[in-house]
Amino acid sequence: MSKVVVITSGKGGVGKTTTSANIATGIAQQGKKTVAIDFDVGLRNLDLVMGCERRVVYDFVNVIRNEAKLQQALIRDKRVENLYILPASQTRDKDALDPEGVGRIIEELKQMGFEYIICDSPAGIEKGAQMAMYFADEAIVVTNPEVSSVRDSDRVLGLLAAKTSRAELGGPAIRTHLLLTRYSPLMVKRGEMLSVGDVLELLGIPLLGVIPESKAVLQSSNKGSPAILDETTDVAQAYLDVVFRYLGQERQHRFIEEEKRSIFGRLFG
Amino acid sequence: MSSPPAVALPLSGAAASGSEASARTSRRQAFDLKGTMASLTVLRLRSTDLALVERQLRVKIAQLPHLFLDAPVLVDLGALGDDAAALAFGELVRALRSCKLVPIAVANVPDGLRGPVTDAGLGVWQPPALGRARGAGDAEPADAASTGPLSAQTGATETPATETPATETPGPEVLRAGASAPAGPSAGAPSVRAPHAGPMVINKPVRGGQIVYAKNNDLVVLAPVNSGAQVIADGHVHIYAPLRGRAVAGAQGLAGARIFCQKLEAELVAISGAYIMAEEIPAQFHGRAVQIFLEGGECRIAAL
C-alpha cells in the first residue's frame, strides 16, 4: 500500500521543503521505499536541500511530457537507502503540470513499489500547490506560530477538503496533520508568539509535532544534508519524533516548553 | 381566476437577470408570464378598529422606515375570522396608503368583501392562501404588521439563477443549500409556503476563503467559522462554536433574521444589509455567547 503525502502550507518560507526533505529521509531510514517529489516547478529547491542538485539530468516535467522515463529522472539518495528524489524543472513554469500527467506519474511510482510518495508543495494556492495536493491521501500542514501563517494554513485546509481528488470523487476525507515549525518557547512565554494551544484552537487538526527554531536548519540546508541526519541537534530529534509518530509510534511532544535553565540563567537572563 | 396568478414581483438583480437570459425564444414574445418567489410584507389584521391599526402602523413604520415606506403589502384577513365581513375595506386601503404602504392584494377574503377588494384595485389572493395553521388564536405578539417571508411560489417553475462567484483557480469554495429546483405547485395541495426543508447543517470547520450559503433557509454551523470565511443565510445563522469570520443573516432582506454564536470573534456581522465591523463590536461582547438582531434598522448585539 502506498501513501501519497502532501507537505503544504499556503505561506512561503515556513519550512515545507525542509520538512519534506527531513520526513522523506526519516521514513526511508526506517526501511520504507520513499520518494520526494518537488512540485515547485520553476523554483526548484528540494534537490539543493537534499544535496543532489548536481545529479539532476531529467526532471518531473520531462517525465510528464514523455521526454524522459520516470527511472531516468528519479535520483537515488547516496546516504540513505530506499530514498529517491524527483526534482522539479528549473526552466518551466507551473502550467507544465496537469492532473493527467501528475496522476500518471504517481500511479507509476505506486507500481514501482514506493510506500511513501512525499509531495513538496510550492507556496501559494495556485496551480502548483493544487497539483501537489490533488492526489494526496494525507497532508502535513506546516505552520509557523504567527497569525498570517495560521490563516494561510486554514485556507489550505479548506482547499484540501474541497479541491482534491478525494473531495471531488467523494472518497474519505484527507487525513490532515499539523506540524508547527520555527517554534520558540521563550517567545511564546513573552507573549510574542502564538502558542501551540493557540494554533491548535484556530486550526482544529491533530498535532504531529513541534520543530524548534534553530540555526541547524539553515546550516543543513546550505550543506545539502537534511538536519535529521545529524542526530545531535534538537531539530533532528524533533523530526525523528515526527517520523516515528507519523509511522504510528507514541512519542511525547517535546520542544514545547522552555528548557530548564540554570540558577544563573534565571538570575541573569 | 383559475389561471396561475401572474405575480411577477421584481427580485433583486441576480434572479431577475437570470430569468431574462433564459427567456430567449426563437419567436419574439412580447412578454414572459412566470411565477416567482418573493419576500413580501404581510399585514395580518387582528383588529377591525382601523384607527388603532393606523396608529400602531405609524409607530412601526417610524421605527423601520426603510423597510416599510412604499413597500408592497399583502393584507391577510385570515386572523379576523368572522369579523372580516364587517371590515370597512375602503377605509383600510386609505389608511394603508396614507401610511405610504402599497397594498397589492388581499388574502383570506370573505365572499362579502370580494366586491370592495376588487373595487379598490387590489388582487384577491386565491386559495394558495396564507397558512391557515398560523391563523387566529396563535400566541404571536399582537403586532399590527408581521413581516415574514411569504414564499409566494406560483405558476411556472423558474429556478432563480444563483450567481456563482467567478472560479479563478483558487476561487472560493461555495456550498449551497436549499431550493435548487422548485418542483412547481403540486397538484394535490398547493401551498404558498415552500415546504420546510430543515436548516442547512455544517459540521466541519468553515475555513478561510470558504463561503457557505443557505439559500431560503437557516444555517446551523457546529464547528468554528474561521477568519476569512463567510457564512450566509437568508434566514437565521446559528454557530455553536467560535465565529471568527463573517456572518450574514437575512441576506435577502429578512429583517427578523438573527445571528446566534457561542463565541463572538467576528470580522463582520450583518443582518438584512446593516452590519457591524470587528472594531465596532463593544469589548464586553468579545469572546462571549451572543445574538445579533436588527433594531431600529441597526445591528444590535446582546449577550445570550
Image: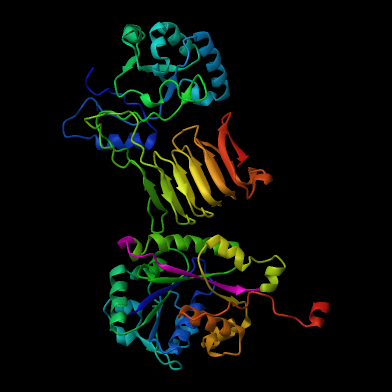
Measuring 49% from the left and 9% from the top, which residue is drawn there? B50
Is the residue A35 above or below the residue A198 in the image?
A: below
The answer to whether residue B77 is left or right of residue A145 is left
If the image is split into quadrants, where does the C terminus of chain B sit? top right
In reply to whether residue A95 is colored magenta, the answer given is no
- Whether residue A86 is visible here, answered yes or no, is no
Is the residue B275 above or below the residue A35 in the image?
A: above
If the image is split into quadrants, where does the N terminus of chain B sit? top left
Measuring 81% from the left and 81% from the top, which residue is drawn there? A263
Q: Where is residue B14 in the image (x, y as percent from the top left)?
A: 37, 38
Q: Where is residue A235 in the image (x, y as percent from the top left)?
A: 58, 82
Q: Where is residue B158 in the image (x, y as percent from the top left)?
A: 27, 35
In reply to whether residue A182 is colored magenta, the answer given is yes
Q: Give the range drawn in magenta.
A: A168-184
Q: Position of residue B70 (x, y in %)?
A: 46, 20
Is the residue A100 above or below the residue A53 in the image?
A: above
**Image label count:** 0
From the viewer's side, name the closer residue of B197 and B213.
B197
